[in-house]
Image (tube, grey):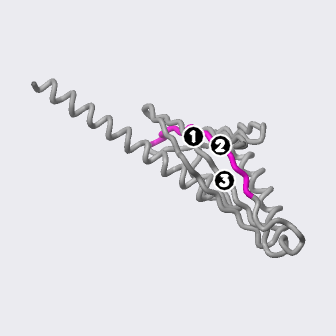
């Protein structure tokens, strides 16, 4: 009887741990999406230093340089389009946890406003890019970190 009780408790604990981990992974993804403004400094804290990033058919394996490239592009956008704003949203997050690793897929929308001057110059007030995303996260020193990000255009 004690063995059965032990196994039931162990099973219940592991099920709750996986559920907690899945919720923690989803929270990291929400933090990542919410930090997708034109300032990516907060987003960097959610990533492992060796993260791989794939988007638009390009694969970046040096996370530091990848973030520097994205930051430089965002700086140019801010100077070229005063008043520009970017808001990202995420939907339909699916998470699968296996020990200290997790895989997630979701839909992401990147909404970029043109700013007043852009609209006056004839630009659309809002441009939206729809993407399907996949992330792989590892639990590193007790925290979930993004080790791989892949975005593809959603048709």
Disc ID at residue 109: 3
For the residue labelled by badge 2, is the local secondary structure a helix, a strand or a loop?
Answer: strand
Residue at the extreme front: 155
Mark identifier at residue 31? none
Give percent across and percent down for residue 119: 83, 72
At x 88%, y 69%, the residue is: 122
Task: Tell me residue 6's x, y (percent).
Answer: 18, 29
Residue hosting label 1: 105
Q: Residue at x 48, y 51 (%)?
A: 27
42 shown above or below 136: below
Answer whether labels 2 and 1 touch (C-beta < 8 Å). Answer: yes
Can residue 126 be found in the magenta stretch? Answer: no
Mark 2: give few (<14), some (14-19) or many (20+) Cα within 10 Å. some
Q: Bounds of the magenta span? A: 128-141
Indicate whether residue 129 is drawn in magenta: yes
Image quarter of the N terminus: top left
Q: Which residue is mark 2?
A: 132
Element type where label 1 sits in the image = strand
């Amino acid at each position: 009887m004690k063995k059965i009780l032990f196994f039931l408790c162990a099973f219940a604990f592991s099920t709750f741990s996986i559920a907690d981990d899945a919720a923690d992974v989803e929270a990291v993804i929400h933090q990542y999406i919410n930090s997708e403004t034109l300032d990516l400094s907060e987003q960097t804290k959610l990533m492992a230093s060796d993260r791989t990033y794939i988007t638009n058919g390009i694969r970046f394996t040096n996370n530091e340089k990848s973030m520097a490239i994205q930051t430089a592009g965002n700086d140019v956008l801010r100077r070229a389009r005063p008043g520009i704003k970017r808001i990202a949203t995420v939907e339909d997050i699916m998470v699968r946890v296996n020990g200290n690793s997790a895989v997630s897929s979701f839909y992401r929308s990147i909404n970029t406003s043109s700013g007043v001057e852009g609209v006056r110059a004839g630009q659309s007030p809002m441009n939206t890019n729809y993407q399907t995303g996949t992330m792989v996260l590892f639990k590193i020193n007790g925290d979930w970190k993004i080790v791989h990000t892949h975005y593809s255009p959603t048709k």
